[in-house]
Structure formats: C-alpha cells, structure tokens
Image: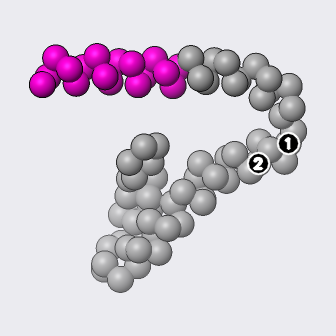
C-alpha cells in the first residue's frame, strides 16, 4: 500500500507542476493590478473569513483564530 501511495503523490505533484508551468506564461500576460489584488484577497481574507466565522463561538482568542485561519485548511484540504 505504501509503495502505491508514494508514486501517486509524486504524480499528483508532477501534474500540479506541469499544469502551473503551462498556465503561468499566458496568465502573466493578462495580469492587471485588479487581478493581483483579487488574488491576494482570495489567498488571505477570503480564505480566512469562513474559518473565523465558524470559530467565533469556540471561545478562542482572536490571535488563535487568526492563526488557525492562516495555517488551517487550504489547498486540497
């Protein structure tokens, strides 16, 4: 099972690398400041807000909520 899992993870990582490399060049040609601001907001505020809303009633300090929002679920989680 471990042997089959490692090549699968390697192929997943390789597919993300190839897809990113193919898309990056054409995407950067159309990059505007609005697109960059939207990307930054999506990777920070928009990603952290649902986590913060869920944790409001948990009794955690705001610093803990910010930490969980930043390092919590992201990517393919």
Looking at the image, residue 61 sits to the left or right of residue 26; the answer is left
Q: Tell me where the magenta segment starts and ends, as one range.
A: 1-17
In the structure shown, which secondary structural element does the residue marked by tag 1 occupy? helix
Residue name at image x 38 percent, y 48 percent: 77
Residue 39 forms part of the magenta stretch: no
Residue at the image point whose x is 69% and y is 45% from the top: 39
Q: Position of residue 4 (x, y in %)?
A: 20, 20
Count of labels in the image: 2
Give the x, y percent position of residue 34: 84, 47
Question: At numbered mark 2, what does the secondary structure look like: helix, strand or loop?
Answer: helix
Determine contact: label 1, label 2, CB under 8 Å.
yes
Counting from the top left corner in percent of width and height, residue 48 is at 51, 60
Seen from the viewer's position, the closer of residues 15 and 25 is: 15
Residue, disc 2: 37
* Residue 69, quarter of picture: bottom left
**Residue at x 78% of width, y 29% of height:** 27
> Taking 62 as reference, is 73 above or below it?
above
Q: Is residue 39 left or right of residue 75?
A: right
Q: Which residue is mark 1?
A: 33
Q: Please, is residue 50 above or below residue 69 in the view?
A: below
User: Residue at the spot x=49%, y=67% of the render?
Assistant: 50
Left or right of residue 13, residue 36 in this image: right
């Amino acid at each position: 099972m471990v042997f089959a899992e490692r090549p699968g993870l390697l192929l997943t990582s390789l597919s993300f690398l190839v897809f990113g490399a193919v898309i990056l060049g054409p995407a950067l040609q159309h990059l505007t400041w609005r697109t960059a601001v939207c990307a930054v907001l999506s990777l920070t505020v928009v990603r952290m807000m649902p986590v913060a809303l869920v944790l409001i009633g948990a009794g955690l300090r705001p610093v803990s909520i910010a930490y969980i929002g930043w390092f919590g679920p992201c990517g393919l989680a």
